[in-house]
Image (cartoon, rainbow, N blue to C red):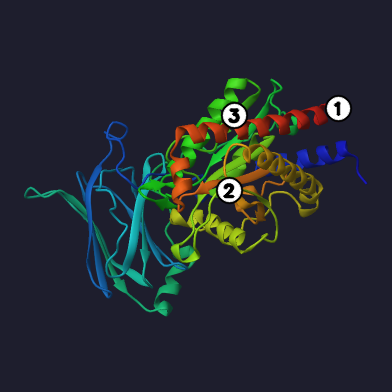
Amino acid sequence: MASRANQRILLGCVLLCAAALPCADSSRLKAAESQPQPAVASANFPTASAARLAGDGRQTRFVLDIDQTVSFRAVTLADPYRVVVDVPQVNFQLPAGTGSGGRGLVKAFRYGLVMPGGSRIVFDLTGPAKIANSYVVEAANGQPARLVLELEEVERTAFVPSLAPENRPELRPAIADPPPATVPASAHPEAGQKADGRAVVVIDPGHGGIDNGTQSSGESEKNLVLAFGLALRERLEKTGKYRVVMTRDDDTFIPLNDRVKVARSLKAALFVSIHADALPRAEGDAQGATIYTLSDKASDAEAQRLADAENRADAIAGFNLAEEPTDVADILIDLTQRETRTFSSRFAHLLMSEMKSTVRMHKHPLKSAGFRVLKAPDVPSVLVEIGYVSNKGDLEHLVSEGWRSRAVGSMAQAIDGFLAKRMATAGSSN
């Protein structure tokens, strides 16, 4: 059997090769909030002031009022049926709740940034439809400019042939791509250490931007977990022990694969994804925090439900990532993934021990499932559902700064304990 040192060298070489692989355009996409955006931050961009639907189940029209004409690109997608419209960056100043209801062929729609300089509108359809007409009308007679999209119902057989990849427009705005993220190909410090010797901790607030996550009583998951993540970062940075990196520190959408890439590119010592669950009314009530680790088979039906829901996050932004090829050979993944899962499990147990003394825990606080965001083979990773927004008591805690401070404190204690032992072990093995 190869020595530990040989395994590290072998994995490092493969990771260097993997870092050189081109990233898919869709993996670089980011989206911002499908609610009114601050005018100060986007004053130089076209402003959309109203949106409306008209028509029926055979023909439906969408109209967006905008203060200047814009170029656009539109495409239909299947499974599920959607229409995606890409435009240059737009300041969406639409009334709250716009798009949550539908009409005719459109069940609902959402909107937001998908990358710096580019915005997107995504329509969820009731069934197959074609874009019968699409155009922009210039401002005239006191009326604003308008982007108009006219949809017509079609049979599935008529819809599918138009989806051939060679006939499908690129799902990105007609603007220059942002510079691709690069992964340093030089030093590869072990156990998540940078040149200054500090461990890297990646905090991953779930959802964001066009993806609100779960919602209840006017509160959205994306905002609750961002506030928690920012507080955790502040607590950890005060110790000076760690380099703390967040996958998002504002209201933007980050594809699942990009979240994992952040941790891997930095050789993180720990990846903590923060979420807040909700149960459908028909499924009763649940409360308390739950800690998830990765497994090929879900620990129970609820864990599977949650994993399925979280793994669909990329589709919210209007695209589905195909099954991505592994960036290292299976045999090399296996060399590290077993040890990584062991570390993840150890941290999950330590985190549960710390959190249960300060916050309410779920009746089954440790679970596992196939979360895509936990699949880095060489970074210990957990997903923490800090509570249920569907539970009144949990929601009161989630919006409370006092509760957040206590929960963050217990999580920081667990991170301290876990990394102190892991760094010591890594140091003694060198």
From the top left corner, tell me how far across and down residue 97 is, in percent.
29, 52
Total labels drawn: 3
Q: Which disc is residue 257 wearing?
A: 2
Residue 40 % position (x, y): 28, 31
Q: Is residue 58 above or below residue 33?
A: below
Query: In terms of sequence position, does the residue under pointer 1 or pointer 2 come before the other?
Result: 2
How far apart are the alpha carbons under marks 1 and 3?
A: 24 Å
Residue at 57% across / 37% down in the picture?
A: 203
In the displayed structure, would residue 198 be above or below residue 362? above
Spatial CA span between label 1 and label 2: 33 Å
Local SS, label 2 = helix
x, y percent for residue 342: 77, 45
The residue pinned by badge 1 equals 428
How busy is the neighbourhood of tag 2: few (under 14 within 10 Å), some, or many (20 plus)? some
**Between 340 and 88, the one nearer to me in the picture:** 340
Q: Is residue 60 above or below residue 426?
A: below
Disc 1 vs disc 2: which is toward the camera? Answer: 1
Task: Name the residue type under label 1.
Answer: Ser
Q: Residue furthest left?
A: 141
Instruction: Inspect the image, locate mark 2, and give the three-letter code of the amino acid beneath it.
Output: Asn
For residue 275, which numbered disc appears in the image?
A: none
Q: Residue at x 29, y 49 (%)?
A: 71
Q: Quadrant of the C terminus?
A: top right
- Residue 244's disc is 3
Q: What residue sits 39% from the left and 46% below the top?
A: 219
Residue 25 seen in render: no
